[in-house]
Amino acid sequence: MNYLKSTIHRTPLTTSSSIDNMTNKHVYFKMENQQKTGAFKIRGASYKIAQLTIEEASRGVIAASAGNHAQGVALAAAKRGIDAKIFMPEHTPEAKIEATMNYGATIVLQGDSFQEAYEAAVLEQKRTGSTFIHPFDDYDIMAGQGTIAFEMLEQATQLDTIIVPIGGGGLIAGIAVAAKHLKPTIKIIGVQATGASATYNCFHKHGLTSLSNVSTIADGIAVKKAGELTFPIIKNYVDNIVTVTDEDIAMAMVYMLERKKSLIEGAGASAFAALLAHGDNIHSDHCGIIVSGGNMDLSKVPYIQQLASENKITCLA
């Protein structure tokens, strides 16, 4: 992983005495919203693209993304001088589309969900022969994301739990393997939105494991089904998965903005939301929270504030 040290930021691990007092835990926030491109995805994308052969790179790369993977692929491809085409859902926040274009990628807006954008990208890859960079179902992608765990356990060796958002599972799979390699006793807890809970359903063996549609303010984890490569790792290495509502996520987003002065997107706030919603059942003295990204669509801030208000978040008074 030495290559990544020269291409990514070593993001801070921050604390807050007010949050410690509120949760009755020592809480540590891994601020991947301060990573290059504003999210953790640059780690996996950079590592994957660095592994491409000259022949694979010469064909250009293609990817599907709800936004953050798109920016990671675009920047990593640009650094290697590789052409990149990214398929994104039509409702992707404008900020993520613009940022991806600014990194030099060609953007194609397709479908109402990540799954529809992904299916369109697969068809295009077959037509063109481009090299596909999957957002999560790839061992190199997982390995890149796993560097977060190495950093966290260097920054705070006392961590006993890490809470991680789950979309397709690449982030939690990489973190779980790396963290348990370094510290086998550590607990890994995954989080999904109630409106996009396919991996949760698979893990707990109930409900639909492939969803016909997803609905959540956390577009970065709005994935219809668990990854084929990531889920076996999740099953073997993750200790529990919980769900949070959009109201829970909104609460966490507003709290992070008001108390920690950090603008966090929905997916990035979901791990903190899980701690706030399920803290009594999370038995941890030193709990790590993955703040996975900060690429928030500012036009949605009033709606987020409304959701938080409707949830009667007294801690924000």
Image (cartoon, grey):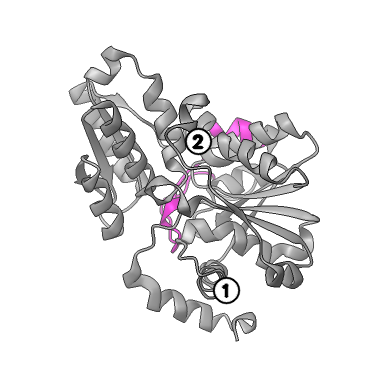
Queried whether the magenta region covers residue 124, the answer comes back as no
Which mark lies nearer to you, 2 or 1?
Answer: 1
Depicted 171 relative to depicted 89: above or below: above
Which quadrant: the C terminus?
Answer: bottom right
**Residue type beneath disc 1:** Arg
The residue that appears at 45% across and 59% down in the rendered structure is 218
Query: Which residues are drawn in magenta?
Result: 209-235
By secondary structure, the bulk of the magenta-drawn segment is best described as loop
Within-10-Å neighbours for mark 2: few <14, some 14–19, many 20+: many
Residue highlighted by disc 1: 259
**Residue type beneath disc 2:** Gly
| In this picture, residue 260 sits left or right of residue 44 | right
Number of labelled discs? 2
Horizontal and vertical percent for residue 315?
A: 64, 80
Residue highlighted by disc 2: 227
Residue 92 in view: no
The foreground one among 186 and 228 is 186
Give whichever of discs 2 and 1 has the lower sequence position: 2
Horizontal and vertical percent for residue 157?
A: 75, 42
| In this picture, residue 181 sits left or right of residue 29 | right
Within-10-Å neighbours for mark 1: few <14, some 14–19, many 20+: few
